[in-house]
Amino acid sequence: MAAVMGASPLAEAFFVAFKLPNFFRRLFGEGAFNAAFVPMFSYKLAEGGREEALSFGRNIFMVLLSALLVFCMLMEIFMPVVMVVLAPGFLDDEKQFNLAVTLTRITFPYLLFISLVSLLSGMLNSVHKFVAGASAPILLNLCLILGLLLYDFTSLTAAHVASIAVAIAGIVQFLWLLYFCKKNGMTFNLFKPKLTPDTKEFLRKLVPGVIGAGVMQINLWVDIIIATFLPGAIAYLYYADRVNQLPLSIIGIALGTAMLPMLSKYFRKGEVEEAIHCQNRALEMALFLTIPAMVAFLVIAEPVVQVLFERGEFTAQNTLATSYALMAYALGLPAFVMVKIFTPAFFAQGDTKTPVRIAIYALILNVILNVFFVFLFQNMGIMPHIGLALATSISSWFNLTILFNLLIKNNKYRIENKTISRILKIIISSIIMAICLMFMRYNMDISVSSLIIMIAVGKISYMMCAFATKAITMEDLRRLRKKA
């Protein structure tokens, strides 16, 4: 994508078109929906049996399908108005504005199918079948890659072809999950949805969770709104976020997905100590993987971005701008991941209101910091888009701090001495790794081979220190491998 579209206005129009359905998907599909649905489905599975749980799931499937059909049709009709609100900076360029509207109309049906994918994935996760849902995004990537490889054989622009690929990917992922649901005895038929007491309870939990579960996504979109006024900023933030999302998705989202049904079971049975033990082990493993990732992005951001993206339409200037954004996002990486660990503790207890209040505070802080940093950086001659990424990181740490303190205050979490000790050892190991990376960074030319060497040496130095300090043990790795 970087090679074909670079950081051009064409790329920025596509990124907005791609992000808009994903924004709603992460709010309604992955975030709030799973927070409200998975605990209820898990409870019915445990108390009422498989058939009662499936009946509930099928009804919610039809409720979601009906609501999304109406929502998608309205968005298609009023897309120009929506674009004025969500990408106001494009109004200065009529051609780019109209392109963004067209591309978003093509991509928006993706929301319908991918939200249904989240529902089916949640049902499979509740019966401890994680592979199908976790592997579904691979299909999106394959569709995008195939589309970009074939666009030369069409009369369309790369952005149009990529948008069509996104829409097709939604259908493919839905069929993928539908197949695995059927394989596990979960079949679905079309019928008129019923507004049962369970459905009403689900909707009551869903509405506040829309904000609570999607605080990071809301913050990211606030960045995009402001970025539309800064040339190239949308593309720089997009590419940086793609790299930053790699450890976040592999570690944070995976842990959060696995923890929600587990914590739901523990809190339902009153096994608070088991829940606390689960959170501490998850925190240790998350930071063992996340802190060195943060350090690596801070030290070798430019080599990473250059090797991954700098070819074709993606220039050296684009590399520099993107690497600075990656460093700013990396500062918040541990917070992003830890939020994914601690938020399920509220959802597992049926509390979707508390994260809403926290989300509002974090969102307000993010907006204030966005404006402040952009104004400050512009006056200091610093690339202003860096301030947008930095504000997102700071607001995520703010969000985490409140979540963490409330769980401790309500006796739903306490950090163990063992966990504190391991975190300190992880930090020491990461600092030693950083020294090794810095030495190589400034004594080697940037290339694919040199980056591979940097990563290999960084990994070896970190693991040696981690084993030496007992930040991690072989037993921990065996347990992780078994549960992965």
Image (spheres, helix red, strand yellow):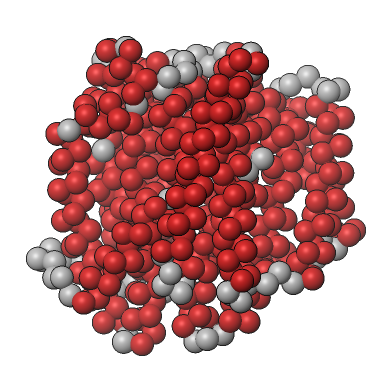
Q: Which residue is drawn at 55% across and 21% down?
A: 375
Above or below for 88 versus 480: above
Residues 335 and 4: in front is 335
Above or below for 121 versus 43: above
The residue most toward the right is 468
Q: Is residue 443 left or right of residue 154?
A: right
Above or below for 121 versus 76: below
Residues 37 and 364: in front is 364
Is residue 198 something that shows in the picture?
A: yes
Above or below for 113 versus 53: above
Q: Residue at x 80, y 51 (%)?
A: 427
Q: Is residue 285 left or right of residue 343?
A: right
Horizontal and vertical percent position of residue 43: 38, 80
Is residue 134 something that shows in the picture?
A: no
Residues 78 and 472: in front is 78
Horizontal and vertical percent position of residue 350: 41, 72
Count of number-bearing discs: 0
